[in-house]
Image (cartoon, rainbow, N blue to C red):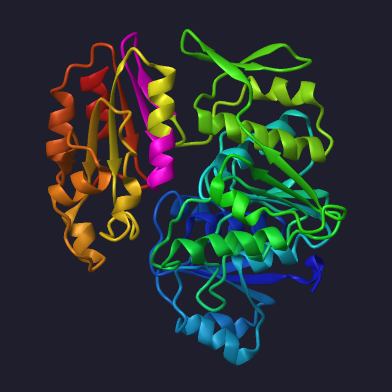
């Protein structure tokens, strides 16, 4: 079915972060968009309402499918017995997962897919920032709200390329295959492999195999760009037909740190000061540079764009700072991300005390069998703190964790453990912040920790 044949599209689970952005992108293209969800939170609620496509009420209504839309897009958190899905199947309406649909609308574009356990959002956002800086026309689908972009999804008929953040998590409740297997990349990136999603990939080998499949999907005349310093990546990014496929390894960009500032060393552009810092981000820059080179961006333009790139939201994001202290917020929650982010802040500010706090709230991070993956993750912190909510553990029907479980798993006798956000807030407010930084790492909210009160007390 061609793009122009889509007159009406219905989204099941339209309130999701990426799904509501897709709904808005389709609406922008003049397509009739309807949808349903059992829960819709902000900012999705207001954004859908402003576009006039917010469902009248929450819940599932199979009768909506009686209008026979041209396609149904199924969100990941919908169940396989969803009443609207069953009705669509009964009526013979084509059902797509999010990645299936993105591929359907980008068959005639060059598809660049950024995969990896960590770094994929940052690499994707660097590429998008550079392309925007250079005035290039491109579509995109990314899993986080990026500075300078109103939406997380853009789909047009004109753009010759699309930049896609390739998540390894499952596409939908029907196919249950990793999303990045369904985009069929021309240029693929593997930024790193560190076991995650234990509820879906029960062993490290099964998890790693998803990236092997992705690597082997690189087509003839395609390109695979990979982190050559990652041992797990080396096991999957094995050149098969080097005459047919370009294999490009990358490493940390040459650099130095001067007075808390990161300086890139380049062959032709000289020294370039950038806002980003951390060894992991210097690898991300190298990956993005290789992608940009493949699509015709000159080195001069790449580095000029980097000077104004401040990073993706919640990736070493500064919540506030003064002469003595910086408060950083980061999305890090998986072991490799926690370790890399903690080391980045300590390396950038070696003379300052580092208070690093991570919230465990995902299925993997709260699983006793997975916890040993966090060994050493907070070792660079002067004050290492772990927070988790017992209610979250109970809700996920998992075995309760003890302080000793966590100290043993992290391998850190200095580790402090908090299970109440008010107690954590009071502890942080009572600390001395003279020549000290605070790093908050979580994909959650620390049980709705009052960040404004924290900032007032610390800064």
Q: Quadrant of residue 319?
A: top left
Vertical order, 121 against 167 (above or below): above
Identify the image quadrant of the N terminus. bottom right
Residue 273 horizontal side relative to residue 395, left or right: right
Vertical order, 52 against 11 (above or below): above
Residue 110 horizontal side relative to residue 172, left or right: right
Q: Quadrant of residue 390?
A: bottom left
Q: Position of residue 334 (x, y in %)?
A: 40, 48
Tell whether position 331 is magenta. Answer: yes
Q: Position of residue 437 (x, y in %)?
A: 31, 21
Can residue 17 be seen in the rendering of this structure?
Answer: yes
Q: Residue at x 55, y 67 (%)?
A: 171
Vertical order, 332 against 97 (above or below): above
Instruction: Work out whether residue 421 or residue 357 is closer to the camera in this orientation and state it.
Output: 357
Vertical order, 135 against 237 (above or below): above
Q: Position of residue 144 (x, y in %)?
A: 52, 46
Q: Position of residue 79 (x, y in %)?
A: 44, 77
Instruction: Work out whether residue 427 or residue 160 is closer to the camera in this orientation and state it.
Output: 427
Can residue 444 be seen in the rendering of this structure?
Answer: no
Q: Which residues are magenta?
A: 317-340
Identify the image quadrant of the C terminus. top left
Q: Residue at x 43, y 56 (%)?
A: 196
């Amino acid at each position: 079915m061609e793009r122009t044949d889509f007159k009406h599209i219905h989204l099941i689970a339209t309130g999701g972060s990426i799904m509501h952005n897709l709904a808005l992108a389709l609406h922008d293209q003049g397509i009739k968009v309807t949808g349903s969800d059992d829960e819709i939170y902000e900012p999705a609620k207001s954004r859908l309402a402003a576009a006039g496509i917010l469902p009248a009420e929450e819940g599932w209504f199979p009768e909506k499918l009686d209008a026979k839309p041209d396609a149904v897009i199924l969100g990941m958190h919908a169940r396989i017995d969803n009443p609207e899905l069953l009705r669509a199947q009964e009526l013979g309406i084509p059902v797509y997962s999010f990645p299936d649909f993105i591929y359907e609308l980008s068959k005639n574009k060059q598809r660049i897919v950024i995969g990896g356990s960590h770094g994929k959002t940052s690499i994707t956002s660097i590429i998008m920032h550079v392309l925007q800086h250079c005035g290039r026309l491109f579509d995109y689908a990314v899993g986080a709200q990026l500075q300078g972009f109103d939406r997380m999804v853009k789909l047009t008929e004109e753009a010759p390329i699309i930049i896609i953040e390739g998540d390894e998590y499952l596409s939908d409740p029907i196919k249950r295959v990793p999303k990045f297997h369904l985009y069929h990349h021309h240029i693929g990136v593997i930024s790193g492999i560190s076991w995650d999603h234990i509820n879906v990939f029960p062993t490290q080998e099964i998890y790693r195999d998803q990236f092997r499949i992705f690597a082997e999907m690189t087509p003839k005349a395609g390109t695979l760009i990979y982190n050559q310093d990652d041992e797990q990546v080396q096991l999957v990014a094995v050149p098969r037909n080097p005459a047919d496929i370009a294999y490009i390894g990358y490493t940390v960009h040459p650099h130095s740190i001067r007075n808390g500032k990161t300086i890139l060393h380049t062959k032709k552009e000289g020294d370039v000061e950038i806002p980003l810092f951390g060894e992991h981000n210097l690898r991300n820059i190298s990956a993005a540079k290789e992608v940009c080179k493949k699509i015709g961006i000159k080195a001069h333009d790449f580095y000029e764009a980097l000077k104004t790139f401040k990073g993706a939201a919640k990736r070493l994001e500064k919540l506030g700072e003064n002469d003595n202290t910086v408060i950083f917020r980061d999305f890090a929650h998986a072991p490799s991300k926690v370790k890399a982010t903690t080391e980045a802040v300590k390396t950038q500010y070696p003379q300052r005390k580092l208070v690093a706090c991570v919230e465990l709230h995902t299925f993997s991070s709260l699983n006793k069998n997975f916890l040993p993956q966090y060994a050493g993750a907070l070792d660079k912190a002067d004050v290492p703190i772990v927070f988790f909510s017992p209610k979250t553990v109970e809700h996920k029907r998992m075995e309760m964790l003890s302080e000793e479980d966590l100290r043993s798993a992290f391998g850190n006798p200095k580790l402090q453990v908090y299970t109440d956000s008010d107690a954590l807030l009071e502890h942080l407010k009572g600390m001395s912040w003279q020549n000290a930084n605070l790093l908050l790492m979580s994909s959650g909210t620390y049980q709705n920790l009052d960040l404004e009160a924290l900032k007032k007390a610390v800064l």
